[in-house]
Image (cartoon, rainbow, N blue to C red):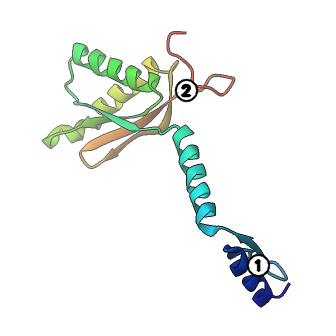
């Protein structure tokens, strides 16, 4: 059908002439209520957005001279974050000349990796950037693809 005739037909029905496939030969148009179509598309997008799971990045900071109790306390926070299916950024902060002993920060993060190997996997291995050494842990997936519960 010619575009002018289709446009007149759409006006007679009180609807809009909407180009559906502009790259087709010839271009494909449809007579519809464009406002209603856009409303339905936005509702579908909202519904899809409602069902998606957002993963947050939580950060836990350590210091090179951390006490064992403080370490365990922060490790338990990391476990709680991983059970909540969040990524965890573990950071060792160095002050002043402490950065010359970067191996201490490496040992702390390696100890964390070893102790959490059942529930977490390393996404980004420890790396020294300025006065901070960071790594990122993510919850491990079980064999069926869903997230694994710690201690189960």
* Viewer-proximal residue among 133 and 39: 39
Q: Is residue 69 left or right of residue 38?
A: left
Tell me: residue 37, above or below residue 50: below
Residue 73 visible in the snapshot: yes
Rendered position, 121 above or below 54: above
Q: Nearer the viewer, residue 82 or 117?
A: 82
Residue extending farthest top = 152
The quadrant in which residue 82 appears is: top left
Quarter of the image where the N terminus is located: bottom right
Percent position (x, y) of residue 27?
79, 80
56 sits left or right of 20 in the view? left
Residue at position x 36%, y 29% from top? 109
Which residue is at 30% across, 15% downward? 72
Quarter of the image containing the C terminus? top right
**Percent position (x, y) of residue 71?**
27, 19
> Which residue has dot 2 on it?
140
Picture mark count: 2
Which residue corresponds to mark 1? Answer: 23
Q: In x, y percent, where is residue 150?
A: 50, 15
Task: Specify which label sits upstream in the sequence, 1 or 2.
Answer: 1
* 3D distance between C-alphas at marks 1 and 2: 45 Å
């Amino acid at each position: 059908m010619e575009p002018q005739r289709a446009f007149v037909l759409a006006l007679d029905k009180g609807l809009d002439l909407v180009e559906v496939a502009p790259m087709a030969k010839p271009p494909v148009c449809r007579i519809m209520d464009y406002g209603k179509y856009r409303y339905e598309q936005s509702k579908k997008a909202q519904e899809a957005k409602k069902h998606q799971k957002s993963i947050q990045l939580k950060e836990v900071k350590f210091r090179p001279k951390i006490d064992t109790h403080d370490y365990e306390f922060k490790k338990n926070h990391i476990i709680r974050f991983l059970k909540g299916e969040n990524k965890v950024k573990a950071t060792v902060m160095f002050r002043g000349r402490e950065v010359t002993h970067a191996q201490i920060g490496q040992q702390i993060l390696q100890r964390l990796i070893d102790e959490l190997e059942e529930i977490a996997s390393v996404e980004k291995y420890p790396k020294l950037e300025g006065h901070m050494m960071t790594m990122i842990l993510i919850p491990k997936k079980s064999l069926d693809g869903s997230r694994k519960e710690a201690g189960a």
